[in-house]
């Protein structure tokens, strides 16, 4: 197999991906060409009144349908596994070359039957050289351009010496040009110059753009590597910070549980507050570790997850916390069936736990939290709604709530602690599972005093 990969290529896979997109664009364009040829025949014959011979009409129709047939074949090839994105196999560059060869042959036939050296279609050879220069290596396009120019001169002189018949467009030219040698030479030289200059300019521009594209991609890869190193460093440092805080928690628990003897109530109150603060510190550290893990993790391991059972487990864990805060929490499923999704159960548990944690944290005594599972809100998706009647989200800040480290103004005013990473983690987990998260505030549980928030997560149903 001929190697058509340009010598300046940095990333073969990226190049072939770009060429694949251009091949698909060419195929779509060719269907338009077929329709345009049919329209041209009808318009030129009945509006402009060109007196085509029967041979010309038949030839142009055959050319038009030939384009449609081989383009349909090209469409089938793109859907098959014949084209490989490797340099040593039949790849998109070879496919591009075949397409351009077929187009040049069809255009040559069309040019001949519409006047040869007098044909208005000859300009489309230049168009094809520009397209070829955007896709193929320069030496291939120069070879094609040379062959086209030689063929053009050869065919023109065959008509001039009456070796082959000349088919004219009599309405466009009132006198013949194909039998004027000066015109043939001048037009042919002009045509050749246009062909080679078009190839030169387009190929150099395409090479420059592709080289710049490759340089940008390399720079982006380096930035991604640096980001991974940074996130790993953050995880290591933050994890080290977590250890001494956990030790402090252990000592506080020993004192608060009176293992070291009775503690005066005033001191115990201060220690209890310190214990709460250490919990908040551990939660902040966990949030930072989780967000770093998500940024490092390019792919997640997926398995069948029964969403309702997972949510029941999370709600059961939070039940005692809700009872202590005098908050009602209920889990509903709209239909009596299993709700199965493909996903990482630990990440999904983290996402829903964060939402429930916020719903409890930003609520007050007498508050309500409802978790609803449904599969009719959106086709082929399971919806999980976490709805509360807590403090809600100010309208002016709704666009920022999924931003890293953002905390709403009403949260800060009431003295709630946090990092502002919880919802960012949730959003990233949902997107890793090809899902979507939306929210409303006020929620459907809102009343005169409580604005509330409703988060809805849509996850694709496991087709199996």
Image: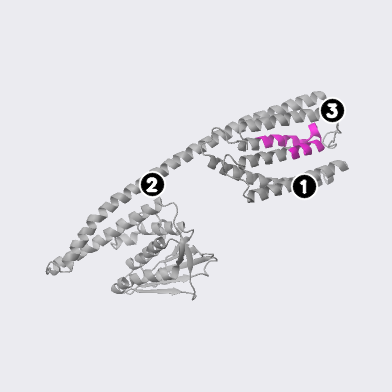
Q: CA distance from mark 1 to mark 3?
A: 29 Å
Q: Which residues are magenta?
A: 105-129
Nearer to the camera, 463 or 108: 463
SS at badge 3: helix
SS at badge 2: helix
Q: Is residue 157 magenta?
A: no
Mark 2 / mark 3, whichever is N-terminal = 3
Residue 447 position within the rendered picture, expressed as x and y whole percent measured from the top left: 39, 73
Q: Nearer the viewer, mark 1 or mark 3?
A: 1
Mark 1 neighbour density, 10 Å: few (under 14) some (14–19) many (20 or more): some
The residue pinned by badge 1 equals 65
Q: CA distance from mark 1 to mark 2?
A: 54 Å
Mark 1 / mark 3, whichever is N-terminal = 1
The residue pinned by badge 3 equals 160
Q: Nearer the viewer, mark 2 or mark 3?
A: 2
Nearer to the camera, 438 or 256: 256
SS at badge 1: helix
Report if the CB atoms under discs 2 and 3 are less than 8 Å apart. no
Where 330 falls versus 90 (above or below)? below
The residue pinned by badge 2 equals 228
């Amino acid at each position: 197999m001929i190697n058509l990969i340009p010598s300046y290529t940095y990333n073969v896979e990226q190049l072939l991906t770009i060429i694949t997109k251009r091949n698909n664009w060419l195929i779509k364009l060719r269907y338009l060409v077929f329709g345009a040829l049919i329209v041209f025949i009808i318009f030129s014959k009945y509006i402009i009144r060109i007196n085509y011979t029967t041979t010309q009409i038949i030839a142009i129709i055959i050319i038009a349908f030939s384009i449609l047939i081989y383009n349909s074949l090209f469409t089938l090839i793109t859907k098959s596994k014949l084209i490989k994105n490797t340099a040593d196999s039949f790849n998109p560059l070879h496919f591009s070359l075949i397409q351009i060869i077929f187009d040049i042959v069809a255009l040559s036939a069309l040019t001949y039957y519409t006047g040869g050296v007098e044909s208005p279609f000859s300009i489309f050879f230049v168009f094809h050289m520009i397209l070829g220069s955007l896709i193929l290596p320069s030496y291939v396009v120069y070879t094609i351009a040379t062959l086209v120019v030689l063929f053009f001169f050869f065919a023109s002189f065959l008509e001039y010496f009456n070796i082959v018949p000349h088919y004219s467009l009599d309405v466009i030219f009132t006198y013949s040009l194909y039998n004027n040698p000066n015109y043939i030479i001048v037009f042919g030289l002009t045509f050749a110059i246009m062909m080679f200059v078009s190839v030169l300019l387009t190929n150099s521009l395409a090479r420059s753009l592709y080289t710049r594209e490759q340089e940008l991609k390399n720079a982006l890869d380096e930035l991604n590597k640096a980001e991974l190193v940074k996130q790993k460093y953050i995880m290591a440092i933050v994890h080290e910070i977590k250890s001494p805080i956990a030790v402090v928690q252990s000592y506080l628990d020993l004192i608060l549980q009176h293992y070291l003897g009775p503690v005066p109530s005033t001191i115990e109150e201060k220690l209890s507050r310190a214990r709460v603060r250490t919990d908040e510190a551990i939660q902040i550290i966990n949030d930072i570790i989780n967000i770093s893990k998500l940024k490092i993790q390019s792919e997640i391991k997926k398995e069948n997850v029964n969403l309702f059972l997972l949510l029941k487990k999370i709600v059961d864990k939070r039940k005692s916390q809700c009872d202590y805060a005098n908050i009602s929490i209920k889990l509903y499923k709209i239909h009596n069936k299993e709700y199965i999704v493909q996903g990482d159960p630990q990440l999904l548990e983290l996402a829903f736990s964060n939402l429930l944690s916020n719903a409890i944290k930003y609520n007050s005594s007498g508050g309500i939290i409802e978790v609803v599972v449904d599969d009719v809100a959106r086709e082929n998706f399971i919806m999980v709604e976490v709805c509360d009647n807590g403090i809600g989200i100010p309208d002016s800040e709704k666009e920022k709530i999924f931003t890293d480290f953002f905390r709403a103004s009403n949260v800060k005013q009431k003295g709630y602690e946090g990092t502002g990473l919880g919802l960012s983690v949730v959003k990233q987990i949902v997107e890793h599972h090809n899902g979507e998260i939306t929210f409303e505030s006020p929620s459907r549980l809102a009343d005169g005093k409580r604005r509330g928030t409703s988060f809805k997560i849509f996850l694709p149903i496991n087709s199996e």
